Image (cartoon, grey):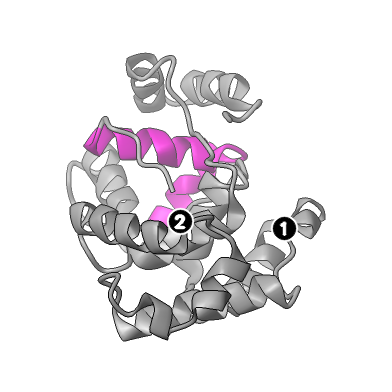
């Protein structure tokens, strides 16, 4: 599923910013894509924390094979002991079980999120062990496809902005935040294009 705002966002960003225009032309026909599964997206983000993409894919494969149908009930039913030989650290197993408990207990209800603003959803998600603001922002971009997220803690975004707009010179967070204002209300789209400037292969969560 691709966002219905993508064409409009790309047009408006291109009209205002020559750098964005070049990226939008280079990656025409490509866009943000959602997997469409809230629990699976968050579980995948936890599995992939602090390890390489290749390692994360391998661990996720073993974890998914053990769980089968990727649902909160399946993960909760297996519990910590049922996941010990999937290549997950003890802490990540705890995080995944806490995530399953939040879904199973109704503390995370995807059906409600359409009526909540970005910060309210971030607050709910970061109440889960192992989910920080960066992970919550990735979820807002890749799952809910919110159009105006600017994940300042993302190293790739920081690097791309500095390389394309500041001659490679590292900038403080305040400067990056102020600079990103030029891309409202389409900062998620701008971020996606900036990521592509570093790696043409899109990442999916």
Task: Let me know if residue 189 is in the magenta part.
Answer: yes
As displayed, is residue 116 above or below residue 33? below
| Residue 109, x across and y down, in percent | 74, 64
Mark 2 / mark 1, whichever is N-terminal: 1
Residue designated by label 1: 110
Instruction: Give me the residue at 25% from left, 50% from top.
Output: 159
The residue carrying pointer 2 sits among few (fewer than 14), some (14 to 19) or many (20 or more) residues within 10 Å by Cα, namely: many
**Quarter of the figure with the N terminus:** top right
Q: Is residue 21 visible?
A: yes
As displayed, is residue 94 above or below residue 194? below
The magenta segment: 175-199
Report the number of numbered marks. 2
Whether residue 109 sits left or right of residue 67 in the image: it is right
Helix, strand or loop status at disc 1: helix
Checking the image for residue 154, the label placed there is: none
Q: CA distance from mark 2 to mark 1?
A: 21 Å
Instruction: Give me the residue at 40% from left, 57% from top.
Output: 64
Instruction: Give me the residue at 39% from left, 33% from top.
Output: 193
Whether residue 61 sits left or right of residue 41 in the image: it is left
Residue designated by label 2: 151
Residue 90, picture quadrant: bottom left
Residue 196, picture quadrant: top left
Whether residue 155 sits left or right of residue 129 in the image: it is left
């Amino acid at each position: 599923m691709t966002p219905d705002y993508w064409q409009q966002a790309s047009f408006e960003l291109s009209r205002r910013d020559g750098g964005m225009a070049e990226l939008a032309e280079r990656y025409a026909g490509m866009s943000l894509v959602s997997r469409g599964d809230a629990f699976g997206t968050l579980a995948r983000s936890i599995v992939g924390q602090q390890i390489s993409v290749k390692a994360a894919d391998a661990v996720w494969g073993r974890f998914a094979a053990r769980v089968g149908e990727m649902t909160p009930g399946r993960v909760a039913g297996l519990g910590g002991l049922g996941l010990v030989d999937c290549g997950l650290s003890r802490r990540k197993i705890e995080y995944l079980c806490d995530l399953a408990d939040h879904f199973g207990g109704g503390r995370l209800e995807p059906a409600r999120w359409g009526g909540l603003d970005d910060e309210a959803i971030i607050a709910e998600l970061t109440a889960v062990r192992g989910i920080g603001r960066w992970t919550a922002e990735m979820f807002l971009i890749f799952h809910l496809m919110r159009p105006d997220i600017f994940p300042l803690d993302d190293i790739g975004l920081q690097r791309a902005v500095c390389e394309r707009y500041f001659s490679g010179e590292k900038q403080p967070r305040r400067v990056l935040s102020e600079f990103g204002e030029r891309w409202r209300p389409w900062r998620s789209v701008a971020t996606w294009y900036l990521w592509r400037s570093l790696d043409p292969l899109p990442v999916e969560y």
